Amino acid sequence: MVHGVPGIVSAIDSTADAVVTKSNEKIEVKDERKVSKGYAKEKKLQQFESINRMLKKMNLLPNICGLNIWLGGSLPGFSGLGASAASSVAIARAIAEEFVLSVSNQEINEIAYEAEKAYAGNPSGIDNTAATFGGLLWFEKNLVDGPNRIEEISLKEPVEIVIGSTGIVANTKAMVEGVADRKKTYPQKYDPLFQEAQVLAINARKAIQNFDLLKVGELMSFNHRLLVDIGVSCKELDQLVDIAREQGAYGAKLTGGGGGGCMVALTPGKNLQEKVAITLENEGFEVLRTKIGIKRI
């Protein structure tokens, strides 16, 4: 979901957990999530900036001295998977619990969005929205004043997917800024691509509501080709997409800001999911077997 184009986002069957306790010292983070190589190091400064942004948004600075923050859960720290948004939501909820603050889901979403600015600069808000509310969502960013348009999409039942990690820690902020610059400089090339993406999103929503998974997969693969043309893919992402499709995935595309990070493949049924996952693992990629359409938050 970029530059005014609607997006479809789903929570997955994995959790980001956080525990926060008050401290008389500085802010310390113990991150026990499974992470791809280099992820924690690359994201460390951004993580502390995001925590400070949350504390300011929650009106807790400069009144606190320190916090001990523990991060865990089954959601791995893979770039492009929305892990930063999920951890921001978990931390915001844990801070609210520790300080006995009454905070609504919408307020948690706004706090996490503020935190996401540390990672993405000008985030769409789609990742923190999925992490806050769960389920399968239609998301349209309001480019002027006012709330974003968020609507739940009905999915007949959860569906298996495979997420493959390139192992490359993507710079989301740089990718977002790069697309914005190219779109502004070459509107004759990029405007039609974004118009195609908008039509694709509308058609994908209809296919999901009809539980036409073959059509959903076809549109996912077409979306990846658009993202290649927009300039946010890389050879590792393309390789992941190609392998997944060769093994029978209904469709596959990059997920997140691109430039590395992850690919998501639609693999309905345990057998197909396992076939795709094992092949990717045999090629040396880290994978996550999970489902979309999970309401749990």
Image (cartoon, rainbow, N blue to C red):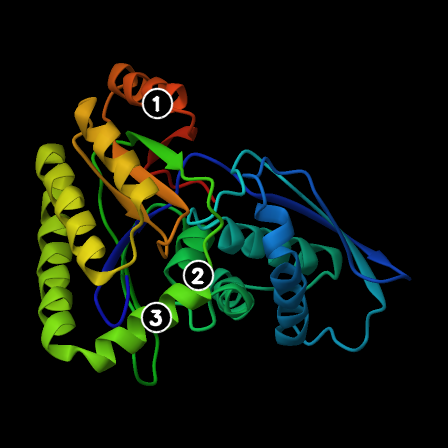
Which of the two labelled residues, at mark 3 and mark 2, occupies the earlier sequence position? 2
- Measured in 3D between alpha carbons, the distance from the residue under mark 3 to the one under mark 2, in whole angstroms, is 10 Å
Q: Amino acid at mark 3?
A: Gly
Element class at badge 2: helix
Picture quadrant where residue 30 is located: top right
Which of the two labelled residues, at mark 2 and mark 1, occupies the earlier sequence position? 2
Q: Amino acid at mark 1?
A: Ala
Q: Residues within 10 Å of mark 1 (few under 14, many from 20)?
A: many
Question: Residue lying furthest right in this view?
Answer: 24
Give the residue pinned by disc 1.
Answer: 277
- Measured in 3D between alpha carbons, the distance from the residue under mark 2 to the one under mark 1, in whole angstroms, is 26 Å
Q: Residues within 10 Å of mark 3 (few under 14, many from 20)?
A: some
Give the residue pinned by disc 2.
Answer: 172
Picture quadrant where residue 294 is located: top left
> Residue 74's spot in the image, x, y percent?
54, 33
Which residue occupies the foreground of this view, 43 or 198?
A: 43
Query: Would residue 217 be seen by someone viewing this image from the given angle?
Result: yes
Q: Are marks 3 and 2 in contact (CB under 8 Å)?
A: no
Q: Amino acid at mark 2?
A: Thr
Give the tally of numbered discs: 3
Q: Is residue 223 above or below residue 165?
A: below
Disc nearest the viewer among 3 and 2: 3
Residue 178, numbered label: 3
> Residue 31's spot in the image, x, y percent?
68, 44
Which of the two labelled residues, at mark 1 and mark 3, occupies the earlier sequence position? 3
Element class at badge 1: helix
Horizontal side, residue 186 vs residue 114: left or right: left
Disc nearest the viewer among 1 and 3: 3
